[in-house]
Amino acid sequence: MRYAVKPTSTAVAIISQCPLPGTARERRDPTIVAGTPNAEVSLLLARLDGTTVEVDTDRTAFPYLVTACWTGEHDPLVLVQSRDQRRMRLLTVDAGTGRAEVLHEDTDPRWLEIVPGVPAWTADGRLVWTADREDTRRLIIGAPGALAEAEPVTPPGLQVRAVIDVDGDTVLFQASAEPAGIGLWSYGPDGLTRRGPDGGVEVGTRAGGTTVVARRGLDRSGAVFLAACVGAALRPSSSVVCSPHGAERNAGTAGPRISALRASIRATTPSGLQLQIQADKPPTTH
């Protein structure tokens, strides 16, 4: 299969995966199982003139191509992992030549957990990463090549589950202070900020300085959507409650003006930003 990462004026990064031989079902789902050969996975830069160049990710030692991302004006980032899942390398790729360079390597005598959303770039050129320190998976933001020395920006006891968005120099992420809840947090120039009410499971998104949070919990039926602009605190008074059957109601008069039409919610923030939240399925998290 081929997966386009980002087009530029000269190239598009694509991943080409060759399925394993076997039955028709195995070819549709080429999952690696114990005792079988590694999947043949390659990373290429495809130029607009039709030529391609393969990126050397050391497939012999690192057969797993975990993820590839290419955002803004920064170089592409690639994450690869050994088959025993005890080594992981973060690579940067020269978009002009396809040459890969190792930025960081993690090792663990048991296994390394893949965290969704990392690696990622901030607008000022720092890398977003996670590291297990003091029995906690913590958020790391540091200069390329210096992640091992970077200090975590989240405290011990707050387990980072996934990075959701990077908006400029602000990172939106999911984390758990206790096993029964998944909260939404952000870290940016103003420090560490809790982005939703306590309790339940929260998902969200952030762009242009606006954060939207969807929360589900046992205290009410349906999901609560909250929006905040340019660093303002999220307030229940600026939320919409959606029942499982599609009935909506305004949860207050202050904050964004919100109207709901069938399976979607459209909101106009005080700054005039138009938001639309699709609510045909309950928000989920993994």
Image (spheres, rainbow, N blue to C red):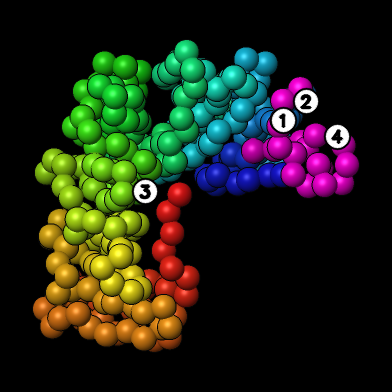
**Do residues under tags 2 and 4 come within 8 Å of each other at their CB atoms?**
no
- The percent coordinates of residue 256 (x first, y second) are 19, 76
User: Marks 2 and 4: which is nearer the front?
Assistant: 2
What is the magenta range?
Answer: 15-35
Distance in Å between CA atoms under marks 1 and 4: 13 Å
- The percent coordinates of residue 138 (x first, y second) are 28, 31
**Do residues under tags 2 and 1 come within 8 Å of each other at their CB atoms?**
yes
Distance in Å between CA atoms under marks 2 and 4: 10 Å
Distance in Å between CA atoms under marks 3 and 1: 30 Å
Other residues around mark 2 within 10 Å, as few (<14) / some (14–19) / many (≥20): few
Other residues around mark 4 within 10 Å, as few (<14) / some (14–19) / many (≥20): few
Q: Is residue 154 magenta?
A: no
Q: Which residue is mark 3?
A: 164
Q: Amino acid at mark 2?
A: Thr
Q: Earlier in the sequence, mark 3 or mark 1?
A: 1
**Do residues under tags 3 and 2 come within 8 Å of each other at their CB atoms?**
no
Q: Which residue is mark 1?
A: 33
Residue in front for this viewpoint, 190 or 49:
190
* View extreme (right): residue: 23
Please say if 59 is above or below 49: above
Q: Which mark is residue 36?
A: 2
Q: Residue at x 68, y 30 (%)?
A: 42
Distance in Å between CA atoms under marks 3 and 4: 35 Å
- The percent coordinates of residue 153 (x first, y second) are 20, 32
User: Marks 3 and 2: which is nearer the front?
Assistant: 2
